[in-house]
Image (cartoon, helix red, strand yellow):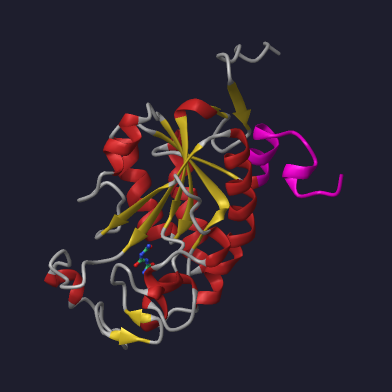
Amino acid sequence: MSAPAPLPEGAVRVPAEPGEFTLDVATTALVIIDMQRDFCEPGGFGETLGNDVSRLRTTIPPLQRVLAAARAVGMTVIHTREGHLPDLSDCPAAKLHRGSPSLRIGDPGPMGRILVRGEYGQGIVDELTPAPGEVVIDKPGKGAFHATSFGDELAARGITRLVVGGVTTEVCVHTTVREANDRGYECLVLADGVGSYFPEFQRVGLEMITAQGGIFGWVAPSTALLSALAPTPALEGTPS
Ligand code: TIU
């Protein structure tokens, strides 16, 4: 067996599919996509579309641990929120009128107007509240690059690799990772840190990323990242 290739100074190895993902904390961002009440709590956009929102909440504990580890090592953290201006001028008719939800974008719901910026429901769940100084990107689309400053924020920080969590796996996570891949970013998706309303989409959504030699990214469990970032019991969530 040949010895593993030497790592650049400051880089760590994360066991992943379809192969090891290396990252340097200084040039990697943790991107947490759309962990909003509108998707994860009853009465929001996700539920108006007919979904069981409890399915997404399994992502919260792993993302809390990853967020704590990223903050501890000084990794850039970026949160995104899907949502629209109060006058909905940034919501294409094609999106506004899609399907037959019980409430449409902009309608008043129990957590405020559905998917409108500044409303309670559009906010990030309490467990993952952004810390002061962390970038929060409001996005009108499913992907984080479309009509936002996300790309500029990454470039300004010299970021080349993304560790991605959030919801939903097959919609906003996939769109963002595909967009990022096309722009030259290498993306590691956290298998238990992304969630779908549909178990089969979760499984196949992750397989799509890693098939064909990692056609647009890598996938690893959050524990693999936690061990790589801080091989100490405390940050892995086990008793010390
Ligand atoms: N409906 C669904 O699965 N997702 C979205 O509408 N947005 C995100 O994934 N954030």
Which residue occupies 44% across, 44% down? 133
The magenta region covers 223-240
Left or right: where 185 falls relative to 229: left
Query: Where on the picture, by quarter, is residue 2?
Result: top right
Q: Quadrant of residue 7?
A: top right
Residue occupying image coordinates x 26% and y 82%: 104
Q: Is residue 139 left or right of residue 199?
A: left
Query: Which quadrant would the N terminus be assigned to in this image?
Result: top right
Q: Position of residue 216 (x, y in %)?
A: 39, 39
201 displayed left or right of 114? right
Residue at 40 percent across and 81 percent down: it is 111
Task: Verify whether residue 224 appears in magenta.
Answer: yes
Which of 19 and 13 lies nearest the eye of the viewer?
13
Q: Position of residue 227 (x, y in %)?
A: 70, 37
Vertical arrangement, residue 157 with respect to residue 68, above or below = above
Q: Is residue 143 visible?
A: yes
User: Is 167 included in the stretch rendered in magenta?
Assistant: no
